[in-house]
């Protein structure tokens, strides 16, 4: 069988002088690109998925500073039509009510996050997803949702053409906490080693926080340097993830 060529996004060189609050273009896919900014006091990254062929714009994890998000959408001359939440924590969705007051949009979340969002008074119509669902954002821009529980029961990663937006599942040289309500270190092991384990080394990691030595990495680099991906045994992983925090 002749292997089919896999479309691979191009990672753009980012000006290292890009400062907090500034949007930079980090990836150029075939028919779409991704812009990123670090917003708010908790080193959160917000991502814009910008399809070229449709008048749509998806914002991933708008936690803070709705004004900066609206301003960048205006620069792109795009309406924010979709909001994708990797999980329910406030630092990933705090700006959603203000964005929706500005303009209605579809809010996508994994179905297992609905109860938490409701408990937290987040009374919105949500588009509820399961792992494997695809959000189509135009030609070549099919973003697949991977269910990666562990940090929360409905945590998701978003995958397209070799790019992976990882929320709080995988950081550069780290992974999300599993000791908060709904956290599950065993599920995190499975998510990192089985679900993300299926993805090739060349996959670009776009994490939910700027916690590592760099803003992005590849799975190849992470499989060498990230202690949570190096930890091959489930029991070792769980013990390390749940070690007392100093
Ligand atoms: Zn979180």
Image: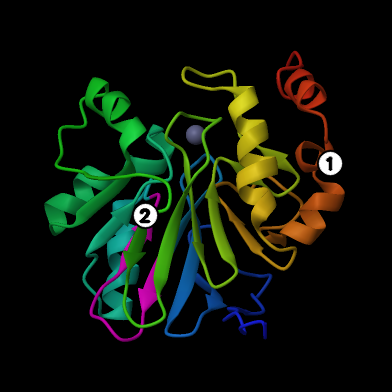
Colouring of the image:
rainbow
Q: Which residue has dot 2 on it?
A: 133
Which residue is drawn at the image coordinates 54% and 30% (left, top)? 151
The C terminus, quarter of image: top right
Q: Are marks 2 and 1 in contact (CB under 8 Å)?
A: no
Left or right: 42 in relation to 232: left
Picture disc at residue 80: none
Residue 55 located within the stretch drawn in magenta: yes
- Closer to the camera in the image, 26 or 54: 54
Residue 52 located within the stretch drawn in magenta: yes
- Disc 2 residue lies near ligand 1 with CB under 8 A: no
Q: CA distance from mark 2 to mark 1?
A: 29 Å
Q: Work out whether residue 23 can be spotted.
A: no
Answer with the quarter of the image where residue 199 lies.
bottom right
Q: Give the percent coordinates (x, y) of residue 12.
A: 62, 80
Q: Compared to 150, does 195 lie above or below?
A: below
Other-residue count near label 1 (Cα within 10 Å), few / some / many at <14 / 14–19 / ≥20? few
Which residue is drawn at the image coordinates 26% and 46% (left, top)? 96
- Closer to the camera in the image, 185 or 195: 195
Q: Compared to 180, does 35 lie above or below?
A: below
Answer with the quarter of the image where residue 176 lies.
top right
Which residue is drawn at the image coordinates 24% and 50% (left, top)? 107
Q: Compared to 27, does 60 lie above or below?
A: above
Other-residue count near label 2 (Cα within 10 Å), few / some / many at <14 / 14–19 / ≥20? some
Q: Where does the magenta region start and end?
A: 48-61
Q: Which residue has dot 1 on it?
A: 230
Q: Give the percent coordinates (x, y) of residue 200.
A: 70, 63
Most extreme residue toward the front, as rendered? Answer: 1
The N terminus, quarter of image: bottom right
Q: Give the percent coordinates (x, y) of residue 144.
A: 44, 60
């Amino acid at each position: 069988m002749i292997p089919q060529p896999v479309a691979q996004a191009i990672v753009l060189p980012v000006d290292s002088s890009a400062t907090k609050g500034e949007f930079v273009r980090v990836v150029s896919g075939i028919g779409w690109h991704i812009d990123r900014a670090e917003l708010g006091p908790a080193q959160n990254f917000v991502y814009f998925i910008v399809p070229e062929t449709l008048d749509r714009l998806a914002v991933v994890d708008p936690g803070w500073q709705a004004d900066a998000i609206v301003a960048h959408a205006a620069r792109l001359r795009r309406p924010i039509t979709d909001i994708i939440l990797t999980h329910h924590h406030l630092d990933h969705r705090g700006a959603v009510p203000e964005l929706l007051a500005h303009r209605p949009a579809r809010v996508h979340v994994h179905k297992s996050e609905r109860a938490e969002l409701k408990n937290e008074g987040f009374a919105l119509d949500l588009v509820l997803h399961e792992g494997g669902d695809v959000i189509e954002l135009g030609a070549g821009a099919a973003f697949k949702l991977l269910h990666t529980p562990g940090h929360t029961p409905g945590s998701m990663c978003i995958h397209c053409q070799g790019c992976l937006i990882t929320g709080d599942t995988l950081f550069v040289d780290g992974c999300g906490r599993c000791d908060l309500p709904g956290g599950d270190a065993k599920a995190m092991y499975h998510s990192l080693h089985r679900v993300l384990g299926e993805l090739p080394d060349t996959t670009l990691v776009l994490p939910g926080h700027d916690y590592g030595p760099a803003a992005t990495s590849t799975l190849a680099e992470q499989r060498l340097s990230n202690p949570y991906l190096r930890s091959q045994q489930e029991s070792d992983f769980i013990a390390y993830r749940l070690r007392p925090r100093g």
